[in-house]
Amino acid sequence: METPLSQNILNNSEQVISIHGLYKSFGDLQVLKGIDFNLNKGENVAVLGKSGTGKSVLIKIIVGLLKPDLGEVLVFGKKIDKLNSTELNETRLRIGFSFQNSALYDSMNVYQNLAFPLTMNVKNLTKKDVDKAVSEALEAVGLTEKLNEMPSDLSGGQRKRIGIARTLILKPEIMLYDEPTSGLDPVTSAEINKLIIDVQKQYNTSSVIITHDLTCAKSTGNRIALLFDGRFLNVGSFEDVFDTDDEQVKGFYNYNFIQ
Amino acid sequence: MIFANRTYIFSKKIDLYFTGVNDAYKFTSLFFKEAIKKPFHMRELVNQCFEVGLKSLALISLTGFIVGIVFTKQSRPSLEDFGATSWLPSLMGIAIVKALGPLVTALICAGKVGSSIGAELGSMKVTEQIDAMEVSAINPFKYLVVTRVLATTITIPVLVLYCSFVGLFGSYINIHSEETISIISFYQNAFKSISFLDVFTSVTKSVVYGFTIGIVGCYKGFNATQGTRGVGKAANQAVVLAMFLIFVEEIVIVQIANWIRYF
């Protein structure tokens, strides 16, 4: 059954990310072997796959941290690997990237972690503006009381939330989540899943969620893309993707939902 | 098949060595490009100068003082043989200002500051903090590397001058314990034999050492791989390579200074 959100996405066909024939290798190891992928405005796509299949490489190419060997990666209609540094930074300001290990700056406290990207990118901000933006972002992830704590004092789930808050402070249009629930207990994972959906609604973001957690993919993704051996095996709704006799896909499903 | 198997020009090790040299050259060139471009992170630069300078001060003071005392103690018997102990202040002035001050300070800073930069940036690299800066549209090279290299280049010459003064003071204490000499008279004698070229060479050396310590630490840290093991390796390599380069630079600069002196 189509939810109002997914109906809205189907009606809105504007593509914020469009990838054609993407190849990427590291030395002799071929990771991505001809990927085609689209992300529509306002939708969440969960990219599922085993470890080492190139899921994180895909989003690192999208944000320009890695360069493709071959193929075209369009973000907001621009070829990401052809942008000069100014254009690339302008594009990056519209993208939020949540790292697998949160990547919080461990020499800064929570406030400084959140204020840093803002003060470095937006000129002439008063202390009051920064304080307001920080508390708004912390409110969005439900951690207002952690303002003065150091990253080392936070739990895994709290670090993930602060990592997401740090990206939200720049009001991104695209969110890229790298393994948002990895290493977390089921209850905290469920909270992060809810947060991803809340961010989509509150900030009207389009998201790519890299995960090998089927529960995360099912609850956060409007579409699922199954990456196996450097290629997308299946793309569609959760039910469509797993309604198959393919042994690899069935094995992946059975491991996550013990049957 | 789209990608052919990788082949090497000489062998894997030799190719990797030359690739490393090329990478280091590109890294250094990038520093000069980024250093003159806006924005300038002055607050971070001041913060790094504080980290490099003030935090090394105690160690430099102690080492400089001990070097001054020990070198004077060891030089005395040789000069006594010729009845020339009155030359001790001059000898110490030349030895400390021209050679010992810059070298001792540089080696201490290579160990303390170089390893700290290598480990800090290495840790930021392997925990994706540098990537996090990049995706937030912040230039990590400019924010992390340019500020640290400038800080070592500015601060280490100041530390060298300070170390030389403390070393000479140590020397004075030792001489004063055996002979009657005022501190003013000691410093006058010590500086009498030092020319402008000596001081200029000493400052030039310390600027080059400071730059070397900063750029090597940043390069090793920025290119750290393999998790926590890589962080340790980066810190270790930053110290070893910086010390090696400092000795090579010492030979080159002294040789150039001698050519200028006799020109």
Image: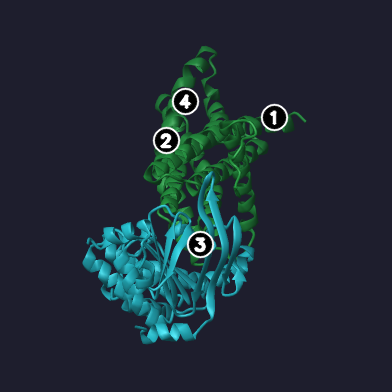
Chain colours: A cyan, B green
Label 4 sits on residue: B72
Q: Which residue is mark 1?
A: B258
Amino acid of disc 1: Asn
Q: Chain of mark 2?
A: B
Q: Position of residue A77 (x, y in %)?
A: 60, 74
Q: Is residue B43 visible?
A: no
Q: Are marks 2 and 1 on the same chain?
A: yes
Real-space Cα distance between discs 1 and 3?
Answer: 46 Å
Residue named by callout 3: B134
Q: Which kind of residue does numbered mark 4 sit on? A: Thr
- Dot 4 or dot 3: first in sequence order is 4
Residue in the picture at 58% in, 35% down: B17
Say which amino acid is labelled 3. Answer: Glu
Chain of residue at mark 3: B
Tell me which residue sits at (39%, 74%) in the image: A237
Which residue appears farthest toward the front when viewing the image? A245
